[in-house]
């Protein structure tokens, strides 16, 4: 019973990181494809302003996931990290380079250096979620069974590649939705339409990749595939699809703030469907939650620590996200104040 509760907490933490971190990765994705220095100036201006207050805090969820896996399910932790150390190591390198690129780009004045740091930030924002998604695909397909030795087959197969691409598309969708809302918040009216088109484009890409994934990979993920196409898993997927369509409709109007909630809801529902389809396994058909769980006493302490974390850290995160989305954490610069009111971020001649 305790192991099951911790497993559900682990799934919630994964969903929280996928949504919170996904928004940041998505912003980096659009930074990568914003174009050259002049054409991409305004989208990157908005991305910098939108990401700056919260881009580090989302890593709290990743740390929480690692603690839950290490303490609650040591067998699962050993299995996954032994078989897929390479993609996970590449994801970790991407995390470091991404943060360094973002932090160093803003104070740098030389254009050449800004391009280098910007490229590091943007490319890492693309590759990191891909490798994380590929690792999830390897788990869902059961290729990381206990005592599996590290090999490319564990994460460089069709299922993992599709899972990685789907993860990138989902982060692009989340990032575009939040940037559309931020464009409204900063009164950058030309960027509202710019990112609105990217919301619709990334949503179409996500749906196409999801359908390709179901069609191509069901032979390799038969257990999870059955769970996603029957019962509770199918219901959650259908609700997620409806909520995603509502998001596409909301960004077409002025209620883009609500689109943030629906976009996060759609991604969280997909992850809930995956967890429901995979139960009672952590690694389908080879490692159940009970088999992977640690000793009873550490699991009980893990629940206590989780409650304490929710009480102490939860309200702070809520306040931080609330202040950020209401625009109270990013004061306008002198250039913003003196610039063209219709085009914030640019100075008038």
Image: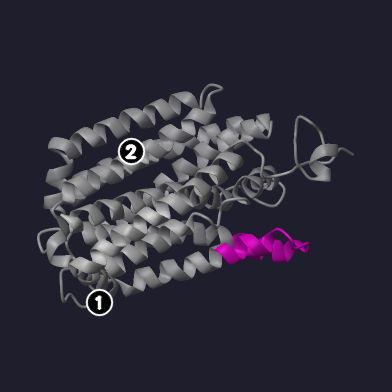
Is 106 colored magenta in this rendering? yes
Sequence-wise, the earlier of marks 1 and 2 is: 1
Please name the residue shown 37% across and 36% down the image.
265
Query: Is disc 2 surrounded by few (<14), some (14 to 19) or many (20+) residues within 10 Å?
Result: some
* Quarter residue 7 falls in: bottom left
Side of 274 relative to 261 (left or right):
left
Q: Is residue 14 above or below residue 340?
A: below
> Secondary structure under badge 1?
loop
Q: Toward the viewer: 273 or 205? A: 273
Q: Residue at x 82, y 38 (%)?
A: 337
The numbered dot on residue 207 is 2
Residue 139 in the image, given as x and y percentages of width and height? 23, 61
Q: Residues within 10 Å of mark 1 (few under 14, many from 20)?
A: some
Question: What secondary structure is the stretch in magenta mostly built from?
Answer: helix
Q: Say the numbered circle drawn on residue 150.
A: 1
Q: What residue range appears in magenta?
A: 99-119
Decide if residue 285 is on the left or right side of residue 263: left
Q: Mark 1 and 2 residues: CB-CB less than 8 Å, in contact?
A: no
Mark 1 vs mark 2: give the one in front: 1
The residue lying furthest to the right in this view is 349
Whether residue 85 is visible to the viewer of this picture, yes or no, is: yes
């Amino acid at each position: 019973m305790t192991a099951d509760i911790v497993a559900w907490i682990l799934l919630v933490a994964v969903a929280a990181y996928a949504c919170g971190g996904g928004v940041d990765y998505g912003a980096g994705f659009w930074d990568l494809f914003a174009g050259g220095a002049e054409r991409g100036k305004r989208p990157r201006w908005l991305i910098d302003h939108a990401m700056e207050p919260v881009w580090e805090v989302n890593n709290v969820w990743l740390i929480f996931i690692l603690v839950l896996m290490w303490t609650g399910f040591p067998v699962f932790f050993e299995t996954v990290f032994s078989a897929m150390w390479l993609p996970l190591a590449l994801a970790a390198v991407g995390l470091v380079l991404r943060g360094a690129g973002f932090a160093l780009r803003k104070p740098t004045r030389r254009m050449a250096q800004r391009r280098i740091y910007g490229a590091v930030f943007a490319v890492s924002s693309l590759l990191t979620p891909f490798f994380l998604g590929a690792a999830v695909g390897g788990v869902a397909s059961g290729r990381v069974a206990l005592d599996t030795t590290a090999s490319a087959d564990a994460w460089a197969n069709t299922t993992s590649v599709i899972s990685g691409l789907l993860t990138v598309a989902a982060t692009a969708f989340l990032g575009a939705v939040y940037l559309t809302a931020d464009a409204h918040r900063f009164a950058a009216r030309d960027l509202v339409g710019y990112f609105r088109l990217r919301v619709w484009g990334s949503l179409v890409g996500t749906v196409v990749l999801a359908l390709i994934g179901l069609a191509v990979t069901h032979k390799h993920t038969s257990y999870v595939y059955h769970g996603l196409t029957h019962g509770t898993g199918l219901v959650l997927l259908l609700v997620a699809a409806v909520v995603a369509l509502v998001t596409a409709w909301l960004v077409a109007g002025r209620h883009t703030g609500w689109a943030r909630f629906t976009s996060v809801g759609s991604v969280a529902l997909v992850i809930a469907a995956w967890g429901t389809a995979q139960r009672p396994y952590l690694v389908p058909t080879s490692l159940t939650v009970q088999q992977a769980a640690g000793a009873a006493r550490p699991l009980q302490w893990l629940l206590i620590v989780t409650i304490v974390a929710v009480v102490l850290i939860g309200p702070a995160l809520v306040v931080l996200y609330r202040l950020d989305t209401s625009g109270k954490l990013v004061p306008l610069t002198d250039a913003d104040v003196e610039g063209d009111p219709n085009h914030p971020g640019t100075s008038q001649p």
